[in-house]
Amino acid sequence: MSAVDDETFGQLLDAIRRFTRERLIPNEERVEAEDDVPAEIVREMRDLGLFGMSIPEEYGGLGLSMRQEALSVIELCRASLAFRSLIGTNVGIGAQGIVMDGTDEQKRRYLPGLATGELVASFALTEPDSGSDAASIRTSARRDGDDFVINGTKRYITNAPRASVFTLMARTNPNEKGAAGITAFLVPADTPGIRLGKPDRKMGQRGTKTCDVVLEDVRVPASAIIGGPERLNQGFKTAMKVLDRGRIHVSAMAIGTARRMLDEALRYATERRQFGQPIAEFQLIQAMLADSQTELAAGRALMLDAADTLEREGAAILEASCSKYYCTEMAGRVADRAVQIHGGAGYMAEYPVERLYRDVRLLRIYEGTSQIQQLVIARNTLKRFAAGTL
Ligand code: COS
């Protein structure tokens, strides 16, 4: 796996920090009001190379290691999560299937455009009747000569309205109801037969774009299979590997947004006076600040350990799930305390914590709910115990 040298990475991290402070945070209210990221911000994110964070340098990306990507995401997620969502699928779940399992031809065709943000990749796994039980998907890809014909509906697909290409999981073996009958395809968004549903109305994260993707007799060649025709019926594994990596990325998001919420709580607690003194001097407020600071530090250490394990061993199933589970639950608790410290003001849209509290709720749900993480953690812990490798 790749990484850039420490000095270059330090400069990038400084640039992201400055960009977040000077450009993203001041534009948060505008994103909320317009439910979109302004075009000039998209351009600036492209100029910084953020769409290509995790794409190898030989394909025009920055070639960051998992640790470097995660540290960058922490900085970026001190601002509204909508900004990260814009690049999220190119950095993570939309593009990683190609990086991990794609053929050379697929990498050459898609990765350079994804690295610059000229193309946007979107990950299409979830369906109306298949969420946590990802292996039960029903979207079918029926072989017809040298082609496959895809029919089905994908739901809550992030960046679908912006997508140029879908990493799409479909059932190629109708006789196999589980994971072994699933193939991952690269489906250009302008392929005839693809229709987008109306934009989803969500609890938070305004400025992020999700909708249904409906496929009616969508014809793709066998060369659209990620990794080529020999990876027929191997798509579930590609999806799971992509999600493992994504779970470390989501952990970093949780840490970044939790840091921001703690900063907001600290600022409010030191400025707001009650009973003749700043509320930060009251021990019951201090207990909430202390718990948030401690849990943030623990989450960061856990996430970086998972990132290093993935980099070193090429897989980190258990570590990624522990990290996603802890960090996203932690961010939920930090959000709750931040609102509590603000008192009545925390319930008012004037203060960022009201919006951040709604935004963060999604992290415990997508890329595998907390309950799915618990299941993966327990299964893999038992497996390692039995093998004596725990
Ligand atoms: N990496 C590589 N391969 C994996 C894997 C991983 N992390 N997890 C599972 N696999 C493989 C298994 O090894 C198995 O292959 P073999 O039969 O060759 O051994 C195959 O995939 C099926 O795995 P398993 O039997 O564990 O599948 P299950 O149906 O029991 O479910 C869970 C697995 C529940 C973990 C999976 O469906 C899941 O992660 N669900 C959540 C989905 C999700 O995150 N959705 C978010 C939508 S995108 S925002």
Image (cartoon, helix red, strand yellow):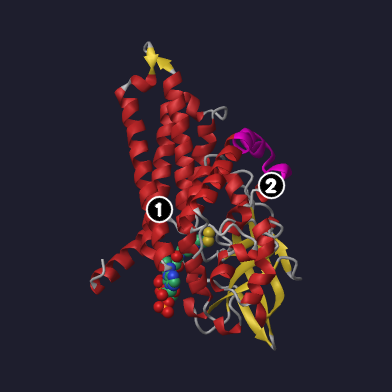
Task: Magenta stretch: give its range.
Answer: 22-41
Q: Is mark 1 within 8 Å of ligand 1?
A: no
Q: Disc 2 marks which amino acid? A: Val
Q: Residue at x 47, y 61 (%)?
A: 245
Near mark 2 (Cα within 10 A), the count class, few <14, some 14-19 or many ≥20, is: some
Would you say residue 75 is visible in this rendering? yes
Q: Nearer the viewer, mark 1 or mark 2?
A: 1
Q: Residue at x 71, y 75 (%)?
A: 217
Residue 106 falls within the magenta-colored stretch: no
Residue 323: image location, x then y, percent: 39, 54
Q: Disc 1 marks which amino acid? A: Leu
- Relative to 206, does residue 270 appear above or below in the rendering? above
Q: Are marks 1 and 2 in contact (CB under 8 Å)?
A: no
Which quarter is ligand 1 in?
bottom left
Q: Residue at x 48, y 80 (%)?
A: 180
Quarter of the picture containing the C terminus is: bottom left
Q: Which of the two residues, 249 or 272, is positioned nearer the viewer here? A: 249
Q: Secondary structure at mark 2?
A: helix
Would you say residue 173 is visible in this rendering? no
Task: State left or right for residue 288 relative to residue 149.
Answer: left
Residue 122: image location, x then y, percent: 62, 61
Marker disc for residue 42: 2
- Relative to 111, does residue 362 appear above or below in the rendering? above
**Of callouts 1 and 2, which one flags the residue occurring earlier in the amino acid sequence?**
2
Residue 190: image location, x then y, percent: 75, 66
